[in-house]
Amino acid sequence: MILGHYGAAFAAKRVVPRSSLGTLAFAAQLLDEIWPIFVLLGIERVRVVPGFMAANPLEFVYYPFTHSLAMAIAWGLLVAGVHFASRRDARTALVLGALVVSHWVLDVPVHGPDLPLWPGSDIFVGLGAWRSVALTMALELGVFAFGVVSYLRQTRARDRVGSVGLWVTVALLLAVLLSGFGPPPPSAKAVGAGALGLWIFVPLMYWVDKHRELRG
């Protein structure tokens, strides 16, 4: 899942309205933000298999340090702990930690049975919605739309950056989703290098959110 994670970040603004959307997006997508680094370093492995699943040509061979349930919880505790130590804001720290773990939860419906419960686990989960393009789009767009609508109800633009910038961000995220239905990448390294581009949405969302204000 790609858009769904950002949908969770948008929706979380209602729970912690003083937290930047950039911070929420960083937490919600943390596992996919560090995964390409692990792939490029050879710590985790992915294969490009055209036709592997209708909506995703990637076979996730080995990624227990970013995409196992136990490590998602560990990363969530790390993010929550760092935030609490620096800000002394328990509510936001809990939400950020929950967003990190929500990534694994939201991945379960779309992935095939390749998500381990812990490093070294022989139990893998995944419901395989990627086998259907229609179902994938319904899940991605449904969660994303819910989050964006929630964010729009919680905030309003202070200037053109806050309005136009938000819709540019939404359009770019939709483009990322649609790019997954194009020709498969040529190699695992290309996958990792391309996935590093997800980091751009963290400062972009900080910037957009800075130009919006809470309603009421």
Image (tube, rainbow, N blue to C red):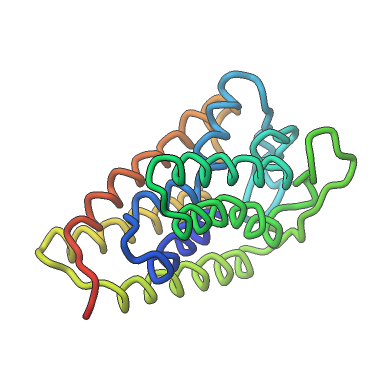
Residue at 52% over, 73% down = 142
Residue 68, position in %: x, y?
Answer: 72, 43
Q: Tell me which corner region of the image, top left, top right, bottom left or bottom right, holds residue 156.
A: bottom left
Residue 176, position in %: x, y?
Answer: 43, 50
Image height check: is 205 above or below 70? below
Residue at 52% over, 49% down = 180
Q: Tell me which corner region of the image, top left, top right, bottom left or bottom right, holds residue 31.
A: top right
Residue at the left extreme of this rendering: 159
Say which of 199 and 15 sits in front. Answer: 15
Say which of 47 and 113 sits in front. Answer: 113
Left or right: 155 in relation to 84? left
Left or right: 168 in relation to 191? left
Residue at 55% over, 51% down = 97
Q: Which quarter of the figure is the C terminus placed in?
A: bottom left
Image height check: is 27 above or below 5? above
Q: Tell me which corner region of the image, top left, top right, bottom left or bottom right, holds residue 150.
A: bottom left
Residue 72, position in %: x, y?
Answer: 65, 45
Left or right: 42 in relation to 215? right
Residue 50, position in %: x, y?
Answer: 66, 41
Q: Which quarter of the figure is the N terminus placed in?
A: bottom right
Residue at 46% over, 49% down = 179
